[in-house]
Amino acid sequence: MKLAKQAGGMIKKDFIGNSVAIPLLFFLLAPFLLYLPVLHKYFVSDDFKVLNRVCLQEIIFVKGFFRPLSDITIYLNYRIGGLDPLIFNSFNLLVHGINSLLLYQFCLRLRISADNRLNRQFAFLAGTLFLTYPFHNEAVVWLLGRGASMSCSFALAGLLFLFSHYNLSKKILLTCSCYFIGLFAFESIIFYPFIILIFIFIKGGSRKEKTAWLSGLLLTLCIHLTLRILISGSVTGNYGGGFAKANPVVYMLNIIKTAGRLIFPPSGEAHWLVLVYIAILIPAGWLGIQLIRKAINPPLNVVKGLILCLCIACIVPVFTGISTITSESDRMLYFPSLFLCMIVSVLLIFFIRNRSKKLLIFFLLLSYNIFLLETNNFHWAIAGKTTESLVSLLKNKTSGKTYVLDIPEEYRGAYIFRQGLSDALRINSINPARVVVINFLTRDQANLPQTPMVRQRRYALNLNKDDNVIFWDGHSFVRLNHKVEK
């Protein structure tokens, strides 16, 4: 009886303090609650192109584009549930939850303090901030954004192998394998070898160990680039042709934009926003330095290492550019946000000694994250509703033609039909000959007031009695009253 009580006490203590079950359930279930408004979101824009190519035509490798791992998972999702958006969206959410859990586990393995309680607090805070990070929507909600989150999964898995108890050769082999596979999903982790080196420095690895790691990772990169060129025909693909041609001033501005967008939401006043970024980031950096100076026994090596990792991870978004107007291109922030969340967590747990202040700051950060995340979810929900309503209306068989007015390219950064309309018709077995597209709306045009009478005066459509007209009302496509056009 006494032994049973002791065993029960040990289980209870372990479940609360060192449990695997609690973080597993939390990080895998919480994404479905946070992203519940977009769980059934319909496909948008480029999704239709890839769904048509991968699922219907069964083509994975194409010239000028090389993200086969993402395409393979899309095909597997299709084989499981057809074109049901719930299957595809659930997969994206599951990957995001796994990444939060992997980050939690990695922070535990860092062991930046002799106090296990502080280590667990640091790990939980980092994982939670990453889970709720407000600019992940494009990587999590958009079907094709999964490439960014999947590459991050393998990068985190490689870091876990780095801090594992395997021998050196096995660590290098497993981490290089993760790096190799992750590059097949997205290019955001291409500078991963330097991040691994930073953590080896933090661990205090020998020069021989650093050389072995760097050699293995660079060899992996060379093999990947060779395959990429042989299969797709280029290193950067269709998206990267102009990266090296940009003016150095553009890259300097991109540094400021990327630093600002890691923390702040986009705004229509892009030029003013850059000035705001500068005005806020400089004092924030100064306050961070003062905080570190006043701390007692701070983990400075870890903080410096994480800041370097953040800078390296931001090279890709600096070169590709980050939008300060909408949430477009936010998927480029997915990988860098790992290190930002870790830095914030270290500062909060180890540099602020007052418990009440810690809880208040954590609550404010969490509120900020969730508010902006749900705002972006609303934008993506509108985008999905828009494409779904258009497909639904076009599926209704009519003897005449259907004229489509004012197709929006996007809704506040959430893609709608910047491309992919013809593929959407093919996927849904809609005869393109009976669909007449009048025009597309740019971002600025979509913000102007659009009424049926405005459209009639603008286009003066001459319709037959069997023809139909549908238009976007700001939230979805609706059928225009036939009499309005007469």
Image (cartoon, rainbow, N blue to C red):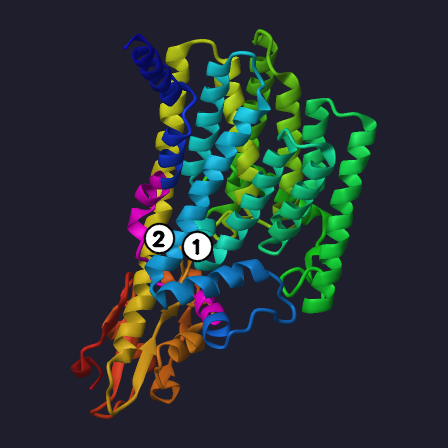
Mark number displayed over residue 379: 2
Judge by depth and name the residue closer to the eye, 221 or 455. Answer: 221
**Could you tell me which quadrant the N terminus lies in?**
top left
Q: Dot 2: within a 10 Å radius of its alpha carbon, few (fewer than 14), some, or many (20 or more) residues?
A: many
| Residue 23 part of the magenta segment | no
**Crowd around label 1: few <14 · some 14–19 · many ≥20 (10 Å):** many
Magenta region, residue range = 29-51
Q: Nearer the viewer, residue 43 or 179?
A: 179
Q: Is residue 399 above or below residue 293?
A: below
Side (left or right) of 130 relative to 293? left
In contact (CB < 8 Å): disc 1 and disc 2: yes
Q: Find residue 365 and report its image quarter.
A: top left
Q: Residue, x 29% and y 79% (percent of image)? A: 394
Question: Looking at the magenta stretch, what is its main secondary structure?
Answer: helix
Of pointers 1 and 2, the one earlier in the residue sequence: 2
The picture places residue 57, in percent across and down from the top left corner, at: 50, 77
Alpha-carbon span between mark 1 and mark 2: 8 Å
Note whether residue 354 is visible: yes
